[in-house]
């Protein structure tokens, strides 16, 4: 059905929900809250939509983008890996 639910007691439940019409994945996390990611064919990664909007605006304006502002949430894989590391101390390589 396009929904992946990760229940990790006692920390909560993460939900990844495929939004086919928007070509997005919606993420819900008890740590970072809701986010939307869209696939970037150039980078071959699922990128946080707010990062994409800011990156595109910076390109249009000729200004610099503060990449640090998005931290580990810039890509879907890094967001998930970061939260699992924070909770369980596990290092995962999730390039997606």
Image (cartoon, rainbow, N blue to C red):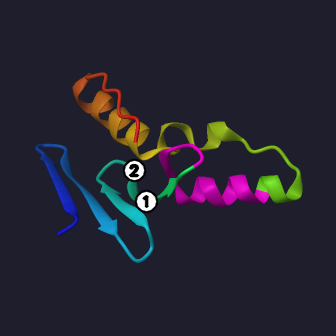
- Identify which residue is drawn at 26% across, 32% down: 87
| Left or right position of 52 against 55 | left
The quarter holding residue 64 reads top right
Crowdedness near tag 1: few (<14), some (14–19) or many (≥20) residues, C-alpha within 10 Å: some
Residue 45 in magenta stretch:
yes
- Identify which residue is drawn at 35% across, 71% down: 19
Dot 2 lies on which element?
A: loop
Pick whichever, 27 or 24, lies toward us: 24
| Left or right position of 5 against 45 | left
Percent coordinates x, y for residue 40 in the rendering: 54, 52
Crowdedness near tag 2: few (<14), some (14–19) or many (≥20) residues, C-alpha within 10 Å: few
Percent coordinates x, y for residue 21 in the rendering: 40, 77
Percent coordinates x, y for residue 70 in the rendering: 58, 44
Dot 1 lies on which element?
A: strand
Percent coordinates x, y for residue 13 in the rendering: 19, 53
| Residue ID for mark 2 | 32
- Identify which residue is drawn at 32% across, 59% down: 28
Q: Residue 35 carries which label?
A: 1
Taking 34 as reference, is 46 above or below it? Answer: above
Alpha carbon separation for disc pair 1 and 2: 8 Å
Magenta segment range? 42-57
């Amino acid at each position: 059905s396009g929904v992946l639910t990760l229940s990790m007691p006692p920390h909560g439940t993460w939900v990844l929900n495929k939004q086919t019409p928007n070509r997005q994945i919606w993420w819900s996390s008890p740590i970072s809250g809701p986010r939307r990611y869209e696939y970037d064919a150039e980078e071959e990664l699922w990128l946080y939509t707010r990062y994409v909007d800011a990156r595109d605006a910076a390109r249009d304006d000729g200004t610099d983008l503060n990449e640090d502002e998005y931290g580990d949430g810039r890509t879907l894989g890094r967001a998930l890996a970061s939260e699992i590391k924070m909770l369980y101390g596990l290092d995962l390589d999730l390039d997606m």
